Amino acid sequence: NETGSTWIFDGDKYTFKTKTKVSTGRFVLDTSTKPKQIDLFKDDDKTPGIYALDGDMLKLCYTDRDKRPSEFVSKKDKSGIALIVLKREKK
């Protein structure tokens, strides 16, 4: 992709790769909520988020704060909310 980063989801594990680092962790999904929820864990740190999967497109909105986002937006304020849209690579 154009940012030089890649997300890989396999089972309940994720890998986030950039040109200079690799980060790994696990994730937990809750499909019973609207919007659907995802919690990303790296060591003991939890990053709460929401997600939407539509075909090969994954929309992921998360924050580095304790409060889970409630909508798919990216904010340039102190909320720490980030929105990314990922497209599945064809193998």
Image (cartoon, rainbow, N blue to C red):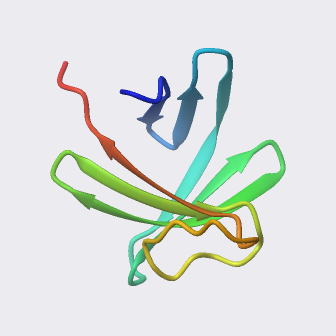
Task: Report the side of 29 relative to 26 (left or right).
Answer: left
Relative to 57, 83 lies left or right: right
If the image is split into quadrants, where does the N terminus sit? Answer: top left
Report the residue at 46% width, 79% height from top: 71
Q: Is 64 placed left or right of 4 in the picture?
A: right
Image quarter for residue 25? top right
> In the rendered view, would you say 22 is above or below 65?
above
Where in the figure is residue 53, as x and y percent of width and height? Answer: 28, 58
Quick one: quadrant of the C terminus? top left
Q: Residue at x 54, y 36 (%)?
A: 14
Nearer to us in this view, 10 or 61:
61
Q: Position of residue 70 (x, y in %)?
A: 51, 82
Nearer to me, 9 or 59: 59
How many marks the image carries: the answer is 0
Q: Residue at x 57, y 76 (%)?
A: 69
User: What residue sits 69% from the left and 71% below the top?
Assistant: 77
Q: Is residue 60 left or right of residue 21?
A: left
Kindly give the residue lying farthest to the right in the view shown. 44
